[in-house]
Amino acid sequence: MRSLLQFIGRHFNFLLLLLLEIVAFVLMATMQPFRQAAFLTSANRLVAQINSVASDVTAYFSLRTQNEELARENADLRFALETLRNRIEPLEEDSSLYQYAHLMNDYIPARVVDLTTDRPHNHLTLNKGLRDGIRPGQGVISAEGVVGTVSAVSEYYALVVPLIHTQTRISCRILPSGSTCFTSWNGVSDRYAALEDVARHVSIAVGDTVVTSGLGGIFEENTPVGIVEQAELGEHDSYYRVRIRLTTDFRHLRYVQIISNPTIEEIREIEHASI
């Protein structure tokens, strides 16, 4: 008790000031309507700011989950779109061969876990593998357009050879002319590629759209590939020198869809048998 009294005596002025400030604060918050309103408004603003920051932080850490959900939804929408297309097209062309050639693809969403963009032989690694139905040779696309093809698969992962690989060739069409050609990449820029086999007689202009041809069954028709930015033809040239800007931004690629074509193996067997 004596120690307590001695402590109070030594710090009496400070303790009195602290007590008076507490009383004044309580009176301001409870006795005067105007000051009470100001106090509550400040408190509510502080709470709102805290809640806003907390919400932003929560939203940031939930982006990955949201993006994965969006990737799944996009895959489902593509599947639904192709289902609808397969119901409509047989009505336009009454042919069993036509119906067989347009069997439905399945779209499997995946996340990019590793990629390179500055090498002659770039690659992507996806978080889906054999257990998810992924097989070598399947096409890979994004919301922007063509990405590449699956080259190797393990139980849980898949390796993809992208468009930005010096040995990649994708069958394409130039719109609106509809002329077929192939992509090629020179290993310089991940934003640009070239077109091969664009003959002299083909109608091509800057701004034309380049899409997949659908040949080979790896990609469906009309998947975006790029936009023509340059088309040069020398006086004695037989083929154009064409540069396109790729629709897929590989440096910011995070989510893709893998195309599972139920007839691709049968197509390959027939092609090999005919050789």
Image: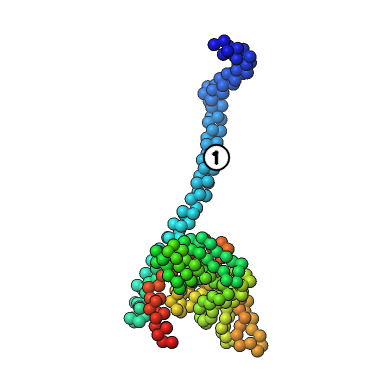
In the depicted structure, whether residue 148 falls above or below residue 198:
above
- For the image, the number of numbered tags is 1
Which image quarter: residue 164?
bottom right
**Residue placed most toward the observer, 275 or 70:** 275
| Position in image of residue 193 (x %, y %) | 59, 74
Q: Residue at x 59, y 66 (%)?
A: 117
Mark 1 residue crowding within 10 angstroms, few (<14) / some (14–19) / many (20+): few
What is the basis of the colouring in this image?
A: rainbow
Dividing the image into 4 quarters, which one contains the C terminus? Answer: bottom left
**Residue placed most toward the observer, 168 or 129:** 129
Amino acid type, mark 1: Gln
Helix, strand or loop at disc 1? helix
**Residue placed farthest to the top in the image?**
2
Which image quarter: residue 261?
bottom left
Q: Residue at x 54, y 43 (%)?
A: 53
| Position in image of residue 239 (x %, y %) | 60, 85
**Residue placed farthest to the front in the image?**
154
In the depicted structure, whether residue 179 falls above or below residue 112:
below
Q: Residue at x 53, y 46 (%)?
A: 56
Q: Is residue 186 visible?
A: yes
Q: Residue at x 41, y 79 (%)?
A: 268
| Position in image of residue 31 (x %, y %) | 53, 22
